[in-house]
Image: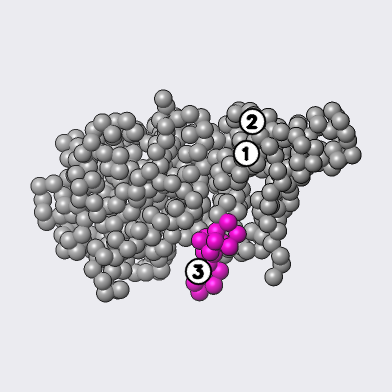
């Protein structure tokens, strides 16, 4: 049996899950469902990056213990999946000393043995928000452009990773798609970053600067492993790296990492270089999504345009939210979410489109006492093509052309005016078409697809609408 192992990004838990997380989690679940339908064994992993300084700072602000803060906030992220109707297989926490820490130290030792870790004194500007050093040319008016904060000037002796050594090898792996980066514009960004020249980077910090939080450097208690060198390992420790070879061998390498565009470099450059150094297999594909704005502007509390995905899911249904995010947010560019646009899509595609189609065919079947045949279990070839590059919105647009076609067919043939065998054959054909749509919809909208497949099996009855009409308020 083939396996498919995929991961979401590992979020810092200092904030709350937002609509970008919802998009990423829906994408991951859609890919997982697809591979499951192909008969593969799948594993979906997420986790929490808990050894970051910003968690320590947030806990201090709130006046609670770091441990208490991490326990509480990690649960919020873990629960986000079930609130969005997604079943995770593994949620791996970075503070887990039994499952996670041994693997982090093992990876360190493998890179060390290969001569890629060395000590040097370093000074630089460190942005805690980014958890990384900034060069002066990256700063705007002395501030981190991402966080609008002045980075701390840090000077200390740290361990460094010999990233520069992997420049050619990485270029080659990405250019040949052995390490496949999707979409194309993000792949181009990575390649141009690598070609501009890779510099070794710091992978530890002093015990004091880390506030004692994090995984100690093997053999040097005065240093703590840098948060990225630690957090990325969650992709392996969550499946047994460092403690359970058999489990790890079964799943690694990851078939797919799904991440946001802000952490591209860490995943397409640092992470593969660390694995190359350790002599471990690389992930096969990295899918990078963009951000979601609202009304053309970045969501912010000040602007008051923050969309809470859990509120939308509660009010209109998880799958209505899921449909919008998968169908309306493009892969390579930032997308947009406003309530008005959401309601427009909801009404057009879900209420009047798919929902209306299911209701019409159910009514016709019930009135003519027609039983459903067993559905054909075939996955559409065109959808398979779309899945190769994770073109979720194109795939759904394609399925919805089928929804529109069948609705049009009903309008033209007017089966309610037909009788006898002609009526029966026409309606039977409509049932087959709706079964085909529902079967192929399963990866994207699993609950809706299951409802339709259920409704159109055996004895068919008209049921309450899949997507109730929303009255204008
Ligand atoms: Zn920053």
Q: Are marks 1 and 2 in contact (CB under 8 Å)?
A: yes
Q: Is residue 208 above or below residue 446?
A: below
Please say whether residue 303 is one of the residues in the magenta stretch. yes
The kind of secondary structure element at disc 1 is helix
State the residue position of label 2: 375
Q: Which mark is residue 155?
A: none
In the picture provided, is 415 more to the left or to the right than 116? Answer: right
Which residue lies at the image location 77% right of the left edge and 37% below the top edge?
369
State the residue position of label 1: 453
Ligand 1 within 8 Å, label 3 CB: no
Asked whether residue 311 appears in the rendered view, the answer is yes
Asked whether residue 160 appears in the rendered view, the answer is no
Q: State the count of labels.
A: 3
Q: Are marks 3 and 2 in contact (CB under 8 Å)?
A: no
State the image coordinates of residue 29 (x, y, percent, origin top left): 48, 44
State the residue position of label 3: 300
Which one is in front in this view, the residue at disc 3 or the one at disc 1? Answer: 1
Which residue lies at the image location 69% right of the left edge and 49% below the top edge?
463
Tell me where the magenta segment starts and ends, as one range. Answer: 299-317
- First of labels 3, 1 by sequence position: 3
Please say whether residue 367 is one of the residues in the magenta stretch. no
State the image coordinates of residue 448 (x, y, percent, origin top left): 60, 46
Q: Is residue 294 above or below residue 275?
A: below
Q: Quadrant of residue 454?
A: top right
């Amino acid at each position: 049996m083939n396996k498919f192992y995929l991961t979401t990004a590992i979020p810092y838990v200092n904030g709350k899950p937002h609509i970008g997380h919802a998009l990423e989690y829906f994408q991951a679940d859609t890919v997982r469902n697809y591979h499951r339908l192909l008969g593969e064994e799948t594993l979906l992993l997420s986790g929490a990056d808990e050894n970051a300084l910003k968690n320590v700072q947030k806990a201090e602000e709130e006046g609670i213990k770091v441990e208490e803060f991490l326990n509480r906030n990690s649960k919020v992220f873990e629960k986000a999946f079930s609130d969005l109707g997604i079943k995770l297989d593994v949620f791996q926490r970075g503070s887990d000393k039994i499952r996670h820490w041994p693997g982090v130290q093992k990876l360190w030792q493998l890179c060390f043995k290969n001569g890629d870790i060395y000590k040097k004194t370093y000074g630089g500007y460190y942005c805690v928000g980014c958890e990384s050093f900034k060069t002066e040319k990256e700063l705007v008016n002395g501030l981190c452009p991402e966080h609008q904060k002045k980075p701390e000037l840090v000077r200390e002796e740290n361990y460094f990773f010999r990233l520069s050594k992997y420049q050619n090898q990485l270029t080659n792996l990405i250019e040949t798609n052995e390490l496949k980066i999707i979409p194309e514009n993000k792949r181009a960004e990575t390649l141009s970053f690598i070609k501009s020249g890779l510099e070794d980077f710091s992978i530890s910090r002093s015990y004091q600067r880390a506030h004692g939080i994090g995984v100690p450097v093997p053999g040097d208690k005065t240093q703590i492993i840098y948060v990225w060198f630690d957090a990325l390992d969650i992709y392996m420790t969550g499946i047994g790296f460092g403690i359970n070879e058999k489990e790890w061998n079964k799943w690694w390498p990851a078939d797919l990492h799904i991440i946001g565009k802000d952490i591209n470099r860490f995943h397409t450059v640092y992470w593969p270089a660390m694995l190359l150094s350790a002599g471990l297999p690389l992930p096969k594909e990295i899918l990078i999504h963009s951000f979601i704005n609202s009304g053309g502007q970045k969501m912010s509390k000040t602007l008051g345009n923050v969309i809470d995905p859990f509120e939308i899911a509660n009010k209109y249904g998880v799958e209505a939210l899921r449909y919008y995010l998968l169908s309306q947010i493009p892969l390579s560019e930032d997308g947009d979410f406003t309530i008005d646009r959401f309601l427009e899509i909801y009404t057009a595609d879900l209420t009047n489109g798919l929902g209306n189609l299911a209701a019409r065919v159910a009514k016709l079947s019930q009135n003519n006492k027609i039983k459903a045949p067993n559905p054909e279990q075939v996955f559409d070839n065109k959808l398979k093509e779309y899945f190769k590059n994770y073109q979720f919105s194109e795939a759904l647009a394609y399925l919805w052309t089928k929804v529109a076609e069948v609705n049009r067919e009903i309008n033209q043939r007017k089966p309610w005016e037909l009788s006898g065998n002609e009526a029966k054959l026409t309606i039977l054909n409509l049932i087959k078409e709706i079964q085909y749509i529902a079967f192929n919809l399963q990866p994207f909208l699993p609950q809706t697809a299951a409802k339709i497949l259920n409704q159109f099996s055996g004895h068919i009855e008209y049921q309450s609408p899949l997507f109730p009409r929303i009255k204008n308020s």
